[in-house]
Amino acid sequence: MFVATLLRAPASPGLDARLVESLRNAWGGGAARWLNPGIAAEFDLPAMPDNRWQVWEDLQALGIDLCVQPAQGRRKAMLLADMDSTMIQQECIDELADMAGVGARVADITARAMNGELDFDGALKERVGLLKGLPESVIAQVLAERITVMPGGKTLIATMKAHGGHAALVSGGFTAFTEAVAKALGFDEHRANTLLAEGGRLTGHVGMPILGKQAKVDALNQITARLGITPDQVIAVGDGANDLGMLHLAGAGVALHAKPSVAAQCDLRVNHGDLTALLYLQGYSVQDFAPN
């Protein structure tokens, strides 16, 4: 048994009941369940539709996300999340680089690395090297003035934790940012790279070993083993090539507003919805959302 979920961005509701019914009838699905009127609906399916991706593409043009997944076990015990451009709306290293006057150069490297065109470790070392001499105090300034959380993040974490879930933030970025973001959003733990500083200024080096693609997979395995659960009980979310390992290993790997080359390798793609989409994908209705 499978379940199909249709999603609109909460900021622009308007999921048409007639469209939901039309697709349900075409695919021979069960009765539609509205998780949030105008925003999220789902229905059961006896089999995976052959034309899933053609329908997905048609719906994308209408501002609608479509996800089809196995129905069994879709409510997860753990959230494993990337940070930059996933739990927050920025890339922290790009913001630091902008303050250092090398914003365009670093942003280009970041985009290529997240798209899988460059080796992550090498790209990170190169970008951090361009930050050499930047006052360490700029980190606090960027956090205060430039970093904004992705809509739905607090609700996602609060709701999963209210139902016994665990939330871990694992980033290829830096602990100076994950510590603040994890605290603000309610994560249980966080892992990231360390920006090295000396005499109040960044040295242009990052602490070793670098937390990259494999380290995110290792984190998933280590945390689930510690909690006594399996990777199948994890919903992971990310947007970059360095997230693909954990997205493929998790029971549900969600490409959120991801680079096209990354999204193409994931079955669950959310391009229009916000982070509450991860709750709807687990079968939560808006009435189940925890206050935050």
Image (cartoon, rainbow, N blue to C red):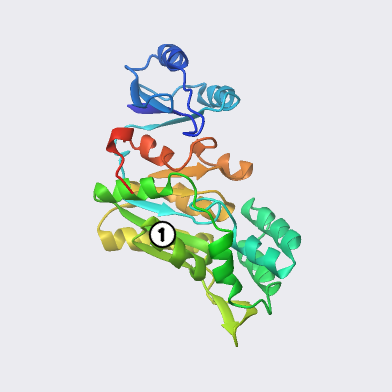
Q: In this view, does 115 lie above or below 98?
A: above
**In the visual, does 93 lie left or right of 49?**
right
Front residue of this view, candidates 91 and 252: 91
Residue beneath label 1, please? Answer: 184
Q: What residue type is labelled 1?
A: Ala
Find residue 264 and report its horizontal and vertical position in percent: 58, 39
Find residue 276 and report its horizontal and vertical position in percent: 41, 40
**In the visual, does 23 lie left or right of 160?**
right
Front residue of this view, candidates 273 and 215: 273
Give the structural element (helix, strand or loop) at label 1.
helix
Split into 4 quadrants, where in the image is the N terminus? top left
**In the visual, does 85 lie left or right of 158?**
right
Find residue 289 and report its horizontal and vertical position in percent: 31, 40
Front residue of this view, candidates 228 and 76: 76
Q: Number of marks in the image? A: 1
| Direction bottom: furthest residue | 199
Q: Residue 62, located in which quarter of the rendered image?
A: top right
Res 208 seen here? yes
Give neighbour class at mark 1: few <14, some 14-19, many 20+ (Cα, 10 Å). few
Q: Residue at x 43, y 44 (%)?
A: 152
Q: Is residue 101 above or below residue 256?
A: below
Res 283 seen here? no
| Direction front: furthest residue | 145
Q: Is residue 57 above or below residue 232?
A: above
Find residue 186 and report its horizontal and vertical position in percent: 36, 57
Q: Which residue is drawn at 28% across and 51% down?
A: 161
Q: Residue at x 74, y 67 (%)?
A: 101
